[in-house]
Image (cartoon, rainbow, N blue to C red):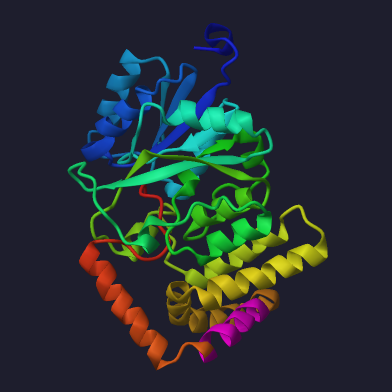
Amino acid sequence: MNDRATGDLPLVSIGLPVYNAERFLRQALDSLLAQDYANVELIVSDNASGDATEEICRSYAGRDSRLHYHRAESNMGAIWNFNRVFELAHGEYFTWAAHDDVRDPRYVSACVAALRARPDAVLCCTDIRFIDDDGRVIQVPAHVAGTRPVGKTARERLRQVARASNWYDVYGLASTAALKRTRRAVPTWGFDVVVTLELCLRGPVVLVPEPLFSYRQPAAKAQAELAGGLGGQGGIGVCWSCLTIELLRAIWLAPFRMPTRIAMAASFLMNFCVLNWRVAAHLRRDLGANVRASMRDKKWGRSAVLLLISAMVYPLYNRVTRALYRRGRREDVWTGSVTGAELPKQP
């Protein structure tokens, strides 16, 4: 299928990185191939799955020429796989997809219409419906539902990303040209948050105010287990201070003058490390070890930044705030939600 066969509709690429995804994969593929938008390509990159994933994908590819299946010889990790599907894409617009989420048939067409109405926009997201393993709609607390970063200015969008505790908009429909100006998936835990921030700093984000995206809440799975598959054989551990460093680097690489970048970095540190108490509580756990490691390795610039973050976080979070955090964690477990960065669900 090409542009000439579909009039003036721009090509939309959907990148689906998978690994041992047999349980929900058919539902995801059905929803992506049922889009009412005519000019779509679906790129599936299989990280050497050992279950029925390959069989399922080849069966679908044999029935629908829009699906292009690629299989790695060994598991290269989620970060490699997320970048791989983007490298294989040809579309003017691009969206990552997860093997267990579901999109409404109008998702792509609604997002393309919103982006074409705002040529300066870099990303389109929709409202989100949360579903359980059986596909039933579930209610989640406000902090789990997240906040769409649709502020009018880059500073407003930066603040929205920094004050959230769950992030989903890496699965929105993005301008391919805008994505090429980002670093895409960097080798760190929480790279999806970094991609989202880098897009938000490069242009407006538009919202389709309908729940056209159904996000499947993963079963209670430890963050360490999710993070372990990010880097392939070597693995990447959960590291909130590492994520903070990469988010600061995203600000530093943004296309702004130096004074603006400094002001944005200061705003980010305050909103992410201090005012976002969930993030601050996580930072308390790994800052000390990472400061020591940076100093041991003589990474003086990194050490200075981590010491600055430590100076902001430690004095302000006393026993009272830690007690509030523990109470919040108990409530999160009770609701079945996952506090912290929503890791891409394909290791």
Q: Is residue 314 magenta?
A: yes
Say whether residue 88 is visible: no
Residue stretch in magenta = 303-315
Q: Position of residue 56 (x, y in %)?
A: 26, 27
Which picture quadrant has residue 274? bottom right
| Main secondary structure along the magenta-highlighted residues | helix
Say whether residue 123 is visible: yes
The answer to whether 243 appears left or right of 71 in the picture is right
**Residue occupying the point 50% across, 84% down:** 288
**Residue occupying the point 42% across, 54% down:** 230
Residue 184's place in the image compared with 65, above or below, is: below
**Residue occupying the point 39% across, 42% down:** 74
**Residue occupying the point 47% across, 56% down:** 147
Residue at the front extreme, as displayed: 209
Q: Position of residue 329 (x, y in %)?
A: 30, 74
Q: Position of residue 242 (x, y in %)?
A: 54, 68
Residue 139's place in the image compared with 89, above or below, is: below
Residue at the top extreme, as displayed: 5
- Counting labels gives 0
Q: Is residue 273 magenta?
A: no
Q: Position of residue 278 (x, y in %)?
A: 42, 73
Residue 98's place in the image compared with 275, above or below, is: above
Residue at the left extreme, as displayed: 134
